Amino acid sequence: MSRQAVLGVESARFHYGSARVFENVSFQLDDARTALVGENGAGKSTLLKCLLGELELDEGQVVRSRGLKIGYVPQEAPEHLLPLPLREVLEGALAHRDGSEDWKVDVLLDETGVGYEAAQRPFSALSGGWRRLMLIAAAMRLSEPDLLILDEPTNHLDLSNINVLERWLEEDARLPMLIVSHDREFLQRATSRTLFLRPDGAHSFATPFVEAREALLQRDAADAARRQLEGKEIERLQKVAARYRVWGIKNDKFHKRAKATEKRIERIEAERTEAYSGRERRLELHDGEMDAKVALRIQGQAVIVPGGERTLIDIDRLSVAMGDRIALLGVNGSGKSTLLNLLAATFDPELEHYDGQAAIRFNPQTRLAYFDQAMVDLPLKASLIDFLCAAEGATTREANALLAKAGFPYARITGPIGNLSHGERARLSFLKMKLAKPNFYLLDEPTNHLDIEGQEELEAQLEGSDVACVFVSHDRYFTRSVATRFLEIRKGRLVEVESPDAFFEAQ
């Protein structure tokens, strides 16, 4: 790091009340780009707050060099910045605010294509993605930190802005960073060191994410196998010791051998390999079936700007078969989410989509589930158990079992949904969808808040089923893994392409 900067923790432990968040965490950042990875609830955000001095560790210490200047971009834009003009937000990030460096703001605005009038508008007028990009740019280019911490930097960014961010990181390779993200492809491209945070500590690898994850899983498997062998050896020695104790009644030398064998058992148990076992947090979809091959037909349908008259997409003809997993590709504002909203709003077993003359016709056997990235329909004041029990035909017993398998402790299921993290809310939404027993999924940015384990579970569930699915995602890894068809929105038309790679590269 610049100026011999140092940041890390030694033997760190943190609890919220009696609940353990993490313990025995030790690491020291170097001049690399380091990815901090962990499942939802592993304590990543808490650890960041400890590094930034906003929270104090229960045990251990934060190691930080004198005068270290840390740049930090949180997941959401701070509320106090929203009413300020964009230019004032950027000027507030300057390392020197005496006016001598205002030219740097002009350069940044010019590079990002923001004109004079746009720079005078309130920061809140920008989309969530552009707010995020401008805060990252300000932290990197204007504040001159010794080290930069980015918390979920790709959230709210479309593919073009993710590519912009990756280019910035590549151009400014000297700045050390700690990056928290669940975006696997971004981590692979942007970082060279990976730090896995688990309840038992931090596990560091001097490699990018994909190689580091493989090494971690191999180590977990080796530890589990070694622990199993040690368990078998303990069982064998226990039987030996039992025989020696019986024989020792008549011969004292066998009594001594029993004692020696028991001490050997104690040594093995004291040094027994610790094998990692993650929390059970299943993410399951319902694998609904349908006798018919085609789940949806669209013919002569216009997708229009909400509340306006401008047409975003003209769909001449589209069929979605059972087993199709269709990725919608398109630039920001091209109508991807608007199309999903239209399909979700049109679906009603009692209305015209069963009419053979309707533009949007769902098969009568279709049972539709819609995942909205904003999760606006979640009743935040309702309890988890009441939310699930509201599903048609759901029982309290079934809801309890699903919540337990998804990793929600029994003590929390009567609490309000509003207390959950965004990742936990996403998992809860998928549980409610499972209870509806759908065979057709509309998914709008389904991986936005899921941790990597959750993303992999969702991928496996979709790949292993014959459901129909139309989805929008800026997650390149997820899109490549899950989709069987790719529809790109080009000049207001849906064009089927063989691969998403050309679209990804064009962004």
Image (cartoon, rainbow, N blue to C red):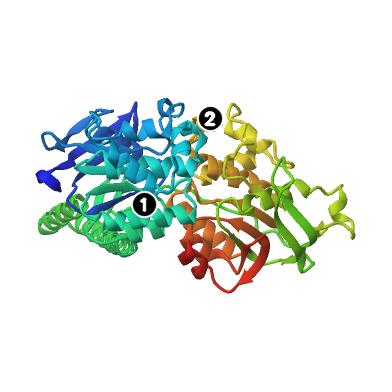
Q: Element type at marker 1?
A: loop
Tell me, for residue 143, which label it has, or none.
none
Q: Are marks 1 and 2 in contact (CB under 8 Å)?
A: no
Image-based side of 158 in relation to 431, left or right: left
Dot 2, crowdedness within 10 Å: few (<14), some or many (≥20)? some
Report how far apart the C-alphas of labels 1 and 2 lie in the structure.
Answer: 28 Å
Residue 36, percent across and down?
31, 49
Q: Nearer the viewer, residue 85 or 177?
A: 85
Residue at the image position 83 percent from the left and 49 percent from the top? 349
**Residue 240 vs residue 181, the one in the foreground:** 181
Based on the displayed image, in which of its 4 quarters is residue 18 positioned? top left
Question: Tag 2, which secondary structure?
Answer: helix
What amino acid type should be assigned to the residue bearing mark 1? Ser
Q: Is residue 28 left or right of residue 507?
A: left
Look at the picture and state if 233 lies above or below 446: below
Q: Give neighbour class at mark 1: few <14, some 14-19, many 20+ (Cα, 10 Å).
A: few
Question: Which residue lies under the disc numbered 2?
Answer: 418
Toward which corner of the image does residue 67 lie, by quadrant?
A: top left
Considering only vertical position in the picture, is 492 above or below 423?
Answer: below
> Of 134 and 325, which appears nearest the observer?
134
| Image location (x, y in percent) of residue 465 | 62, 64
- Where is 475 relative to 134, above or below? below
**Image quadrant in which you'd find residue 32:** bottom left
Residue 16: x and y, percent? Answer: 34, 29
Is residue 47 visible in the rendered structure shown here?
no
Q: Position of residue 99 (x, y in %)?
A: 25, 31
- Say which label, 1 or 2, has the lower sequence index: 1
Residue 384 lies, with reference to residue 279, above or below; the image says above
Which of label 1 and label 2 is nearer to you?
Answer: 2
- Residue type of the residue flagged with mark 2: Gly
Q: Which residue is mark 1?
A: 277
Tally of numbered tags: 2
